């Protein structure tokens, strides 16, 4: 999983750490063969990447990992979510299919055409989505075998102003949104996150984005796998859309490191 030719990378942490920092949406990379099926011209594609990419989140996770007393594992997507989105359900359970954003996107953040009408994304699911899901499942299994629990912390960001693709964009947009799941997010994990991120202007729960990522092999089945999504509003740490990071990045990395240390020691 450390092969840099892969579309994802597992960066080892301490053998006794249960924590996996999952960074699925930080990359802008699109393989040439995938680019051919995207109908946007180069300038429009760059604008779309500005809006859809969780810019600098891999840097936040890396900086946090370097500060932790017990180094967490990091699972990082090395390709853009415009290739496949590894956090979507790969079937009709995915509500974002209604706006053309299932596992393989066919519409943009502004609900414009991204891939041709009727595009069949099954080849992309087989080539990219399924191996990613299998590798993330293995990473969780390895933590369970090593320390009998796994804590998946999803590191995301979201725009200050809602984009047209958002299905729930009319709700609160706090500086840090915590996505939780009734089965996989224990109260102590949520409370720890509320505490460490309180200094950024407040946190909210499941608005504008809800839920968290757990590999489907464990989803709703294994309480040893806990999970929390961290959605950082982009004005907290960067220039929007798609601009450089600012001083907020370092502070966020420190808070994330504090969370990792708290849940890792629990």
Image (cartoon, grey):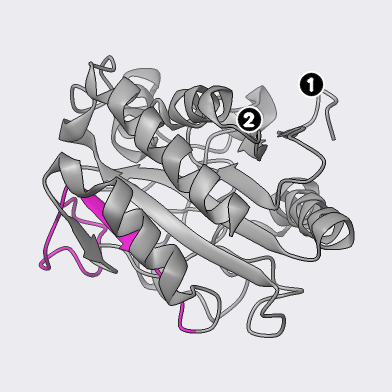
Q: Is residue 81 magenta?
A: no
| Residue beneath the point at 50% across and 29% down | 58
Residue 242 is left or right of residue 105, and the answer is: left
Q: Is residue 209 visible?
A: yes
User: Magenta residues?
Assistant: 162-182
| Disc 1: which residue | 4
Which element carries disc 1, helix, strand or loop? Answer: loop
Q: Is residue 95 above or below residue 235?
A: below
Please tell me which residue lies in front, 69 or 8.
69
Q: Is residue 84 left or right of residue 139?
A: left
| Residue at x 55% of width, y 75% of height | 184
Q: Residues within 10 Å of mark 2 (few under 14, many from 20)?
A: many
- Which residue sits at x=58%, y=43%? 21
173 sits to left or right of 158: left
**Residue ID at (54%, 55%):** 263
Name the quarter where the N terminus is drawn. top right
| Quadrant hosting residue 150 | bottom right
Q: Quadrant of residue 74?
A: top right
Residue 200 position (above or below residue 138): above
Q: Position of residue 262 (x, y in %)?
A: 50, 50
Task: Decide whether the magenta segment is chiefly helix, strand or loop.
Answer: loop
**Between marks 1 and 2, how big is the CA–CA gap?**
9 Å
- Residue 102 appears in the rendering: no
The first of marks 1 and 2 along the sequence is 1
Q: Secondary structure at mark 2?
A: loop
Q: Position of residue 54 (x, y in %)?
A: 39, 36
Q: Which residue is mark 2?
A: 78
Quarter of the rendering containing residue 99: bottom left
Left/right placement of residue 249 relative to residue 17 reads left
Residues 208 and 114: in front is 208
Q: Which mark is residue 122?
A: none
Please say if the residues under marks 1 and 2 sit with CB atoms less than 8 Å apart: yes
């Amino acid at each position: 999983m450390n092969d840099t030719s892969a579309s994802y990378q597992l960066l080892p942490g301490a053998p006794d750490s249960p924590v996996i920092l999952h960074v699925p949406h930080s990359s802008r990379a699109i393989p040439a063969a995938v680019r051919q099926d995207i109908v946007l011209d180069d300038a429009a594609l760059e604008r779309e990447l500005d809006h859809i990419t969780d810019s600098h989140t891999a840097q936040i996770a890396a900086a946090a990992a370097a500060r932790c007393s017990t180094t967490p594992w990091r699972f990082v997507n090395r390709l853009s979510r415009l290739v496949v989105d590894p956090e979507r359900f790969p079937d009709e359970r995915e509500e974002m299919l209604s706006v053309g954003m299932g596992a393989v996107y066919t519409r943009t953040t502004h609900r414009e055409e991204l891939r041709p009408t009727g595009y069949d994304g099954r080849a992309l699911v087989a080539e990219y989505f399924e191996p990613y899901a299998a590798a993330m499942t293995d990473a969780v299994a390895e933590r369970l075998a090593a320390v009998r629990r796994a804590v998946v912390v999803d590191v995301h960001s979201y725009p200050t102003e809602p984009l047209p693709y958002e299905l729930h964009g009319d709700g609160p947009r706090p500086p840090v949104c915590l996505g939780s799941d009734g089965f996989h997010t224990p109260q102590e994990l949520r409370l720890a996150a509320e505490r460490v991120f309180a200094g950024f202007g407040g946190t909210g729960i499941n608005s504008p984005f809800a839920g968290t990522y757990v590999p489907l092999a464990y989803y709703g089945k294994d309480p040893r796998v806990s999970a929390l999504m961290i959605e950082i509003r982009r004005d907290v740490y960067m220039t929007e859309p798609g601009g450089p990071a600012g001083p907020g990045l370092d502070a966020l990395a420190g808070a994330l490191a504090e969370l990792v240390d708290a849940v890792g020691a629990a």
